[in-house]
Image (spheres, coloured by chain):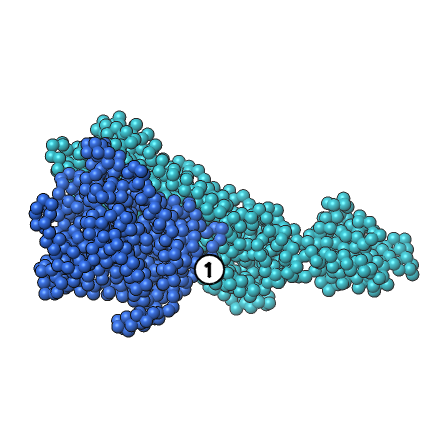
Chain colours: A cyan, B blue
Amino acid sequence: MPGPRRNRTRTSRKPLPTPLPSHRGRGGLLDPRQLVRALPDALRKLNPATLWHNPVMLIVEVGAAWSTVLAVREATVFGWLIAFWLWLTVLFANLAESVAESRGKAQADTLRRAKRATMARRLPGWEPGREPAGGTEEAVPAPQLQQGDHVIVEAGEIIPGDGDVVEGIASVDESAITGESAPVIRESGGDRSAVTGGTKVLSDRIIVKITQKPGESFIDRMIALVEGARRQKTPNEIALNILLAGLTIIFLLAVATLQPLAVFAKNTQPGIPDTATLNGNGVTGIVLASLLVCLIPTTIGALLSAIGIAGMDRLVQHNVLAMSGRAIEAAGDVNTLLLDKTGTITLGNRQAARFVPVSGVEESHLADAGQLSSLADATPEGRSIVVFAKQRYGLRERTPGELAHATWVPFTAQTRMSGVDLADTGEVRSLRKGAATAVMKWVRDHGGHPTQEAGHLVDGVSATGGTPLVVGEVIRHGEVTGARVLGVIHLKDVVKEGMRERFDHMRTMGIRTVMITGDNPLTAKAISDEAGVDDFLAEATPEDKLALIRREQEGGRLVAMTGDGTNDAPALAQADVGVAMNTGTSAAKEAGNMVDLDSNPTKLIEIVVIGKQLLITRGALTTFSIANDIAKYFAIIPAMFAAVHPSLDTLNIMRLASPESAILSAVVFNALIIVALIPLALRGVRYRPASASALLSRNLSLYGLGGIITPFIGIKLIDLIVRFIPGVS
Amino acid sequence: MGPTAAGALFALSLLVAVALVHRPLGDYMARVFTSRHHVRAEWWMYRLIGVDPDGEQTWAVYARSVLAFSAVSVLFLYGFQRLQSHLFLNLGLPAVKSDLAWNTAVSFVTNTNWQAYAGESTMGHLVQVAGLAVQNFVSAAVGIAVAIALVRGFARSRTDKLGNFWVDLVRGCLRILLPVCVVAAVVLVAGGAVQSFVEPQTVQTLSGAQQAVTGGPVASQEAIKNFGTNGGGFYNANSAHPFENPTVWTNWVEIFLLLAIGFSLPRTFGRMVGDLRQGYAIVAVMAVLAIGSQLAVHGFQLAHQGTVPTAVGAATEGIETRFGVANSAAFASATTLTSTGSVNSFHDSYTSLGGAVLLANMMLGEVAPGGVGSGLYGILILAVVTVFVAGLMVGRTPEFLGKKIRAREIKLASLYFLTTPALVLLGTAVAMALPEGREGMLNRGPHGLSEVLYAFTSAGNNNGSAFAGLAADTTFYNTALGLAMLAGRFVPVVLVLALAGSLAAQRSTPVTAGTLPTHRPQFVGMVAGVTVILVALTFFPALALGPLAEGLR
């Protein structure tokens, strides 16, 4: 192949994000049936032993239980209603979590189907390079396979475990895990050697070296991940939990210490009769429980774990598996994105972009010669010349058999040329296309003298970062030989569509993009300018990559990268977010903390957005939750104390009908808002790439200001209804 | 010029003066705490207390030094008062009873200066000068030192060292507090404040009665009382006493002194973290809250409904006529916003809503601008909490000045903002539940409740001003308020130092477009909002049963 070699090549099956496979549920709106299905699980979660991990909701449950006891002892409609709605509050919180989990469960079921019991054909004592003798094969149940075992898998069989192909090549149906039905090629050696247990060999025969430990296969891990069985709280979630616990304690204190003040207020005015909210013993237990539940941050407390599960789930819907929640959060924090040029920023291969003839040669003539000489070149570059000539000059692609008397000279790495010899009544026309030095030498060997102009053209293409291929022509007419250079084909990397906009978005989000390439600095510069990345690393070796990551991290930055090769493994492990391609080697998958099943390196950008969305959803709902408290105070304080201090009725700005209706409305609102926000928690708040300042303004006005106003309206509306309940008005 | 215009001019001129001084004073303090040079007097002191001034301390050692120094100070001050009758310059006053001595010792060491006693009839000159005034200096310097340690936590990276407490303490006293107070005392003497060691003089009053007038080293105490945001007056009447605060212009000077350091420290902070804009943002938060509070107190004092205020045109009860309503409101607002607690009028006599604002000023956690040092670290904690919520909303692990706010940081910040509300609310509830607590109230009904709430708010936030009206010199109140002051000071101090330690240990994250900017008006508004909402949400029920029940119509 002509031109400088890349250190490795990769073809991307899917250059841009694909629509989700149908069997994975979409995020978005909440299906009421989902709620019903999640109900039994939600009821099970009422068990305090499972609820204790959520202190906010545990307090609500204690309040609900306490209210129930009080309602039993002194049965009033008001008391029972409050107790009922407090229980509903806990239930709604559980429901949110169950709904989030149920989506994962559905995916886990699909995966389990892939994990059918298979028998493996183990080859004991087999060594690479040896033909397996028929007698040495033994049948072993897949779960009993050990690391390092060799198994043979033939067409129609299921691969029994994760491993690397050590011999053979096969097409494999990986739809069980990727949801993608098109088969993929897996072959020994190189970066496409990894196979996953549970996938099916469609053709040929391969020998696989098992790399997983028993019970720790990729599918096992996937099931555990999507089911949330191994879900651990992420660092930010822990920090937020602490803040919520702090706020809960404050409100617990504010409510608990209110009692002596209330007793004092009541007893200094003995003439005022007892009310449903306040008597000589202070505020009634039911009202205190209501006040406490309304004040503690129940909205976020109820939805926090659902948000985390849904975040993980959104990644899975993008066909990305995060090995830990920590990795998703880190993705939101990423400062530097390392992107491989090939397959990520540019299409897989260089393509012909221009025919540059020397003076005296028609461009169409050069195109024709270029096409003819490339027909026998099966490399992607050669194909691109044929395609380009067809698209640009309308030259029909000719098949090798079509032309009579044509001798095809295929491309080899030794000659670095391809071409054709066309014999036509005494005249033999030879065309060659290939690396500049090779073709020029060929022309000179046939007595031609490449002009200085040709040299300039070659240099000109190189200078812009392109790869020049030279087309030469030799015409033998009897003894007379004419040899000349026709011109230069300009090959260049083609930047994927829309990359510049994406990098601009990254920049507004404060993320620096660095292109990694094995190209020389000149080429790298040209492509990075065209793609609009912030920086590039040219002639990069795996060590350079690792060093770059270390350097960035030393400066306090978080780095994300994708990789698939074994030589990427150290860098993947070092990066804060390392996304391994599913097509890559086991070593790469082991080293990264995420795996992209679509093997689409551009996905990194979506992963960053999902990470940010997760944090924003938490922050927004926390703000909303706290902002809600203002309205609740305006509902409950006058309801409790207006009897003893009529002046406090001034605070009843919502003009709620009665103390009972006010408190009930606040409690009902508090419960309903959880259900109303479940879809938001599952979907995540809308995220548009913007600067931190713009994002904050938007979210503050939406969830801060909105959080202050919404409950005023909501509580008033609920009051308009509950005031008609006898015993509440 | 009408009284309203004069009042506005008075407040405005203060604002201008503080704005003018905040830069040079802030820069000067930054130099004091970053300089490597020790002056001779300091060397001598370090040798005396046996510390190596160039050896830096970890947060734990720093905290231990603060606690040890303060514990010794409390013991010393307690003993001093108990042995007063055996000492010279005691004006013939007896030893201070034990519960009051405990309360006073804690009060002065914690920079609270709650006074359950009448200065002139309880403390002799020696205790005033060698005991109380000394604590006025060192307790203020301790506050500044802790704040500086926190600033170093932000400014430094990947170290466990926060500076040396003893160096910070000595420099704070010698290089900042002492020089300014010497000048200020002379200015106050020039204005008519008293400075002497004479025995009480007996004079004949206009009505013919005999009265013993106590003189003493008043002006010197007055200077540090305000500059160090202490607030413990020489006389029971505090800054309403003509010997402490003779004229309108000394009143101006005193208010200026109590605002000066608090508003300048954000500049020191900006200077030390290498980004002046961060300092401006913090000072802006303080200013927004302070100006809002000033306007509110003024408004309520001038326009509150009620028979007498309506007839007179303003709430004049409990106000010194030589200052007037506006200048008293300015003082009251400044003294409650700065955790000073000196008073030139009686807060108990303020309109209910005016009094509610003064209460709320303290409930803010003394951050606008707060006590010397404590105001800065208080507001930085609130900024940390704000950054946490705001940071999540921009989709990143929250960062403040390049330091990530994670579980440990938020744990310490949460405990910090829990401490004072817990003390205030629990204290008030206990007092209202016990007959000993209720007996102290002068008024029944909501106003009585306000008196108790005010006392615990003042003690828990280390303000020290009294609503008056509460008979506080009882065993119950002396003990309970003493405990509130002690915990209200040192629990937060330890938490702040722990936070400083974990911040200093972190490496600094570079700023990008994705980083939440903490120097814009947006952030200023948000910190102010979080501060106010946190207070409103915590104290709203208590305020509703106290001043709001009384003041709303």
* Left-right relation of A428 to A255: right
Which kind of residue does numbered mark 1 sit on? Answer: Gly
The picture places residue A414, in percent across and down from the top left corner, at 73, 64
Q: Who is closer to the viewer here, B94 or B537? A: B94
Which residue carries the number 1 mark? A556
Query: Subunit of mark 1?
Result: A
Quarter of the image holding residue A19?
top right
Is residue A123 left or right of B456 when viewed as pictured?
A: right
Badge 1 marks a residue whose secondary structure is loop
Q: Residue furthest left?
A: B209
On screen, residue B290 above or below A206:
above
| Residue A666 shown left or right of residue A511 in the figure | left
Q: Total number of numbered labels?
A: 1
Q: Is residue A17 visible?
A: yes
The x, y position of residue B223, in whole percent, is 26, 56
**Quadrant in the picture for the N terminus of chain A:** bottom right
Q: B242 or B310, which lies in front?
A: B242
Q: Residue at x 16, y 42 (%)?
A: B448
Residue at 21% in and 38% down? B316
Nearer to me, B371 or A648: B371
Residue A178 in picture, x, y percent from top left: 52, 49
